[in-house]
Image: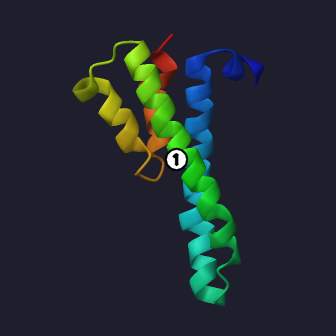
């Protein structure tokens, strides 16, 4: 766990993982429960958590991309696009982030 916190790519990968999990919890558990049980409490709790992780992921991706001179159209936009797709951050971690550094 500490190896993820010691490097910028490690922190980006950790945020990507947490963002992906929060998206899956939000759309896979919280939203169905909201409509099945008419109880929006889990969505109200997970929504801001996911939003914060989303912003952290985008900001860290842009920062890392600038620092490592990623070409925006080749790499950076693919990494950012991944956070809009369920399981996207896990895929992008496997295909791009795990191979950096």
Corner quadrant of residue 43: bottom right
User: Residue 10, located in which quarter of the rendered image?
Assistant: top right
Q: What element carries label 1?
A: helix
- Horizontal relation, residue 84 to residue 4: left or right: left
- Image mark count: 1
Give the image quarter of residue 75: top left
Which residue sits at x=58%, y=46%? Answer: 53
Where's residue 80, x and y in %? 39, 38
Residue 35 drawn at (x, y percent): 57, 85
Q: In this view, does 87 lie to the left or right of 11?
A: left
Pick the quarter of the image with the N terminus. Answer: top right
Badge 1: few (under 14), some or many (20 or more) residues near its Cα, within 10 Å?
many
Spot occupied by residue 45 in the image (x, y as percentages of width and height): 69, 66
Q: Which residue is drawn at 63% across and 15% down?
A: 7
Residue 52 left/right relative to 83: right
Query: Residue 56: x percent and y percent?
Result: 55, 39
Indicate how the structure is coloured in the image: rainbow
Residue at x 55% of width, y 56% of height: 23
Q: Name the residue under label 1.
A: 54
Task: Using residue 90 as the reference point, say whether residue 17 is left or right of it.
Answer: right
Residue most extreme to the left: 73
Q: Is residue 10 above or below residue 44?
A: above
**Residue pushed farthest right?**
2
68 over 29 or under it: above or below: above
Q: Which residue occupies the foreground of this view, 6 or 3?
A: 6
Q: In percent of the image, x 63 and y 43: which residue is there?
A: 18
């Amino acid at each position: 766990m500490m190896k993820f916190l010691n490097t910028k790519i490690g922190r980006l990968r950790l945020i990507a993982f947490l963002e992906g999990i929060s998206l899956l919890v939000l759309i896979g558990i919280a939203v169905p429960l909201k409509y099945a049980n008419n109880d929006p409490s889990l969505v109200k709790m997970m929504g801001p958590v996911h939003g914060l992780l989303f912003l952290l992921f985008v900001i860290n991706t842009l920062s890392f991309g600038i620092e490592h001179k990623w070409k925006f159209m080749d790499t950076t936009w693919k990494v950012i696009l991944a956070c809009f797709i369920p399981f996207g951050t896990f895929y992008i971690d496997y295909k791009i982030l795990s191979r950096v550094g």
